[in-house]
Amino acid sequence: MIQVLNKEQIVDLRKSGKILSQAIKETLSYVKPGISTLSLDEVAERSLRRQGALPSFKNYHVAGSGRFPSSLCVSINSELVHGIPKPNKIVKNGDIISLDLGANYNGMFSDMAVTVGVGKISEKNKKLIEVTDSVLKYAISQIYSGIKTGDLGYLIESYVEKRGYVCIHDLVGHGIGTAPHMEPQVPNFGKKGTGQEINNGMAIAIEPMVSSGNNKIKTDRDNWTIRMDDGQNCAHFEHTVLIYNNKADVITK
């Protein structure tokens, strides 16, 4: 279902995004060598609940994978998305980690992800993070009411490939609103003039996923953790944006 939000829903969406952004900021402040990924999950969930929201990923069901057991996805190095926090999964100096979190405030959902370095990281990893962060900002700046998903995907992939990286094709962004994942799909690749038109009143989660190797992925035995097939590191950034007054308004900022 393509959803156009009403005024009341937009108010709650903005609140959801503000809560989520604060929870991510709080969680990032705990990222350091030696911390467990489970500890980061606990920080994120406490922050959401303290602010009056629920974690939208916890117990989220996907056919074939089951229910996701945590609030926060923590993916390290070659892990792309959906890493499950564990007490014995420890963040180390030189790692890059993706934190992906969703919030449900009064039935309105928001979604956000960031990738950061832990301690001292390599120049190669710094560049990977920088390109992925910058392509998200660039894509958001190019959105207008009437743009098609194929146009947006083309802009993202062209930007990434010009800098020597690849976009993952098997996972995409999505519409968002009264459910955490809705139509339309928002790929990080595409052909100009194709796809679903994005208009005022729609909310979408844009999430470029970038690697320095190839774009093939595989799923771990836990049925959730998705990683790069070639073992190369990857990065993931995401914002929820509302199309408002003919441009993208970032609500997770």
Image (cartoon, grey):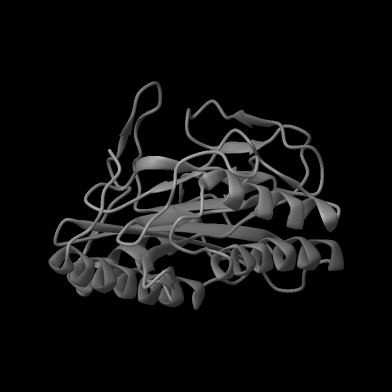
What residue lies at 21% left-to-right and 73% top-to-bottom? Answer: 50
Residue 151: x %, y % from top left? 60, 49
**Residue 220 seen in render:** yes
Say whether residue 196 is left or right of residue 231: left
- Quarter of the rendering containing residue 35: bottom right
What residue lies at 64% left-to-right and 67% top-to-bottom? Answer: 138
Q: How many marks?
A: 0
Residue 77: x %, y % from top left? 69, 51
Q: 42 and 209: which one is in front?
A: 209
Q: Is residue 229 above or below residue 75?
A: above
Q: Is residue 165 above or below residue 133?
A: above
Q: Is residue 100 above or below residue 241?
A: above
**Residue 77 seen in render:** no
Residue 193: x %, y % from top left? 59, 43
Q: Quadrant of the C terminus?
A: bottom left
Q: Quadrant of the N terminus?
A: top left
Say whether residue 233 is left or right of residue 239: right
